[in-house]
Image (cartoon, rainbow, N blue to C red):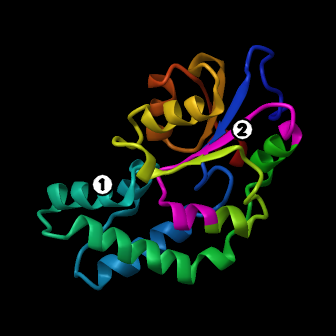
Amino acid sequence: MHNSVPAHIKGLIFDLDGTLVNTMPMHYQAWLDTMQTKNADFPEPLFYELAGVPSDKIVVILNEKFGYDLDPKAIAHEKEHLFLERYVPQVQPIEAVVAIAQAYKGKLPMAVATGGIPVVSKALLNAINMSDFFETLVTSVDVVNGKPAPDTFLEAARRLGIEPALCQVYEDSDAGLEGARRAGMMGVDIRAWLK
């Protein structure tokens, strides 16, 4: 059963994109649309490798890897704006993960910890009718270092008032699972459920 949580766990932390909401193919399309206007490429395997990394940091990585000279903040803003306008209205929840949140609502404190930006993250939660569901939302603007650094998860635990070792994280990316591990939390890779 996917939704059983070990007895010692006192708080649940959920990634957003690709975990609570099925957005990864749409994010990739928004990246392609944005990069195409700059005559730049973003190979799909690299996109999935960088899942969970904040958009401006992704642009820095693309610049280093391909010799581009793209403005990280401007490109990230353009991509996020495009995603918000064109793709957010189409998003669907990932039912297996949403069911866990629903099962533990009011039983355990819960947070969303994402590499996304606030306006997009709030719009996504709103699109799946979960805007007031979690005690806190930690986004890329709340921490200095995004995933795979542990900062996003540690901030979520701090806001929930729960020791990191007593938190369980739901993630769909290697970077996110690495961040959870570095935070001293139990990570659950939801990708196995989606096959």
Q: Give yes or no for residue 7 being in the magenta stretch.
A: no
Estimate the spatial distance between the alpha carbons at disc 1 and disc 2, rounded to whole Å.
27 Å
* Residue under pointer 1: 57
| Whether residue 195 is visible | no
Say which amino acid is labelled 1.
Lys
- For label 1, count other residues whose C-alpha is less than 10 Å away and answer few (under 14), some (14-19) or many (20+): some
Name the residue nearer the viewer: 195 or 92. Answer: 92
- Secondary element under disc 2, as helix, strand or loop, is strand
**Mark found first going from the N terminus, 1 or 2:** 1
Q: Quadrant of residue 100?
A: top right
Rendering coords of residue 161 (x, y %): 64, 26
- Label placed on residue 104: none
* 177 up-or-down from 87: above or below: above
Q: Residue at x 50, y 51 (%)?
A: 139
Name the residue nearer the viewer: 151 or 181. Answer: 151
- Label placed on residue 110: 2
Rendering coords of residue 107 (x, y %): 86, 32
Q: Residue at x 11, y 63 (%)?
A: 67
Q: Quadrant of residue 148?
A: top left
Say which amino acid is labelled 2.
Met
Rendering coords of residue 26 (x, y %): 54, 71
Magenta stretch: give its range: 103-122
